[in-house]
Image (spheres, rainbow, N blue to C red):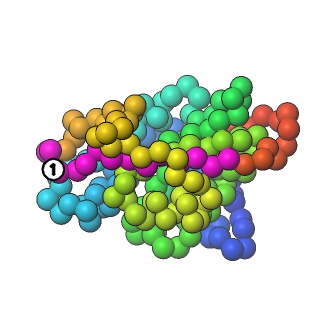
């Protein structure tokens, strides 16, 4: 896979660089730091990692996944993991994160645009986010065009059980919002490129 620069005059210029095995530990650490910042805003007593290394590496190494480090202004600014089924034309946004020092610059929107461009045949996108992560809810609905279609909670448990192995049992509710984005196929019959 080669590097790809994404330029849109309304968004910051980013480059997507595939994550290789040598980058994996750094990718996991940065992902955890970004997610932990959000949970600590909700529960300052929280310790550990809200998302486990296993959850991230399972996504990184899934056979149908693509994963990228996001470069902005010469620095690593975030990361993303996706998967896609050409048969169903469904895609999953497994993980998208922006390093906290880059928040508020439009990098998340630039990442999302690049990912949609990478999968022109994807008709349905799906992603999850914890209910307390208001920044993500705003981003997916108001910036990316997703709709919330399901709310997992005690009365309606998630089919995606959390991995609680990396935190100390702080009071973090296991409540998640499931989002979908449906769009018209942009180029019928083409396959998504493994090179953005």
x, y (%) of residue 32? 33, 50
- Does residue 180 appear to the left or right of 138 in the view shown? right
Name which residue lies at 85% across and 33% down.
Answer: 189
**Outermost residue, right side:** 188
| Closer-to-camera residue (59/178) | 178
Name which residue lies at 63% across and 49% down.
Answer: 181
- Does residue 55 appear to the left or right of 107 in the view shown? left
| Closer-to-camera residue (66/113) | 113
The answer to whether any part of residue 172 appears in the image is: yes
Name which residue lies at 61% across and 60% down.
Answer: 144
x, y (%) of residue 195? 70, 42
x, y (%) of residue 59? 46, 34
x, y (%) of residue 4? 69, 52
Q: Is residue 174 magenta?
A: yes
Please determine whether, in this image, residue 15 is positioned above or below residue 155. below
The answer to whether any part of residue 55 appears in the image is: no
| Closer-to-camera residue (72/140) | 140
**Outermost residue, front side:** 155
Name which residue lies at 70% across and 34% down.
Answer: 89
- Magenta-highlighted residues: 168-182
Q: Does the magenta stretch include residue 12?
A: no
Please determine whether, in this image, residue 77 is positioned above or below residue 12. above
State the image quarter where residue 43 is shown: bottom left
Mark 1 Cα shell of 10 Å, populated few (<14), some (14-19), many (≥20): few
Where disc 1 sits, the SS reads loop
Query: Where does label 1 land, which residue?
Result: 170
State the image quarter where residue 1 is shown: top right
């Amino acid at each position: 896979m080669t590097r790809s620069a994404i330029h849109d005059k309304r968004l910051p210029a980013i480059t997507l660089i595939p994550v290789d095995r040598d980058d994996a530990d750094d990718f996991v650490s940065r992902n955890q730091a970004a997610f932990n910042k959000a949970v600590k805003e909700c529960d300052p007593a929280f310790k550990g990692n809200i998302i486990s290394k296993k959850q991230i590496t399972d996504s990184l190494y899934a056979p149908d996944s693509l994963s990228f480090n996001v470069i902005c202004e010469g620095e690593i600014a975030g990361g993303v993991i996706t998967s896609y089924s050409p048969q169903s034309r469904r895609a999953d946004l497994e993980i998208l994160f922006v390093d906290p020092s880059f928040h508020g610059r439009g990098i998340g929107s630039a990442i999302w645009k690049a990912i949609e461009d990478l999968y022109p045949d994807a008709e349905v996108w799906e992603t999850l986010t914890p209910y307390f992560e208001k920044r993500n809810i705003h981003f997916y609905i108001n910036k990316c065009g997703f709709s919330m279609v399901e709310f997992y909670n005690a009365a309606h448990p998630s089919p995606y059980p959390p991995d609680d192995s990396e935190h100390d049992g702080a009071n973090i509710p296991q409540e998640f919002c499931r989002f979908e984005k449906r769009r018209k196929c942009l180029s019928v019959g083409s396959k998504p490129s493994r090179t953005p």
